[in-house]
Image: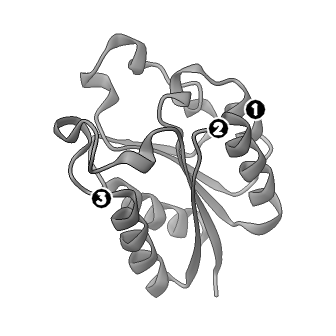
Amino acid sequence: MAGTIFILNGPNLNLLGQREVDVYGATTLGEIEEACRTAAAPLGYAIEFRQSNQEGELVTWIQEAREQAVGLVINAAAYTHTSYAIPDALATFDGAKIEVHLSNIFKREVFRHHSTLSNQVDGVICGLGPKGYVLAIEAIAEIAGS
């Protein structure tokens, strides 16, 4: 086993497939999790997939990942644009880090054009829908050298 990748999802992502389907698509978070596990298995990675509507819980999970994970994928959702605690936590994680957004944040409201996380991650994937998660796993595998 090459290690564990934490995949952390922020507020309202538990409602994927139900809310704003025209923006986020019809794929559910459970289906994204399944795609992530399918993509990670042949690369030798285990997946720890989590979602929270609470900023502090995301911070706690990033801290937990410091001890357990070789890589971290984060879709902080609205916290991408408002949080300072999450990027501070990301700065403490030494493994590969990829920021993911289902929609193209640069084609949306102006406040979404800025990410407080981006300067703490190795790469950003946005606008590719659920495929972005799979690409993030592949990127972590490449960065981690497996």
Front position among marks 2 and 3? 2
Q: Which residue is mark 1?
A: 88
Label 2, label 3: how many angstroms apart (C-alpha)? Answer: 25 Å
Residue at the spot x=38%, y=60% of the render?
A: 135
Question: Is residue 140 found left or right of 63 in the rendered image?
Answer: left
Q: Which residue is mark 2?
A: 54
Where residue 46 appears, as percent x and y from the top left, is 59, 78
Rendered image: mark on residue 47 = none
Label 3, label 1: how many angstroms apart (C-alpha)? Answer: 27 Å
* Residue farthest top in this picture: 110
Where residue 56 appears, as percent x and y from the top left, is 73, 37
**15, above or below 3, in the image:** above
Q: Residues within 10 Å of mark 3 (few under 14, many from 20)?
A: some
First in sequence: mark 2 vs mark 3: 2
Label 2, label 1: how many angstroms apart (C-alpha)? Answer: 16 Å
Q: Quadrant of residue 44?
A: bottom right
**120, above or below 52, in the image:** above
Residue at the spot x=39%, y=19% of the render?
A: 113
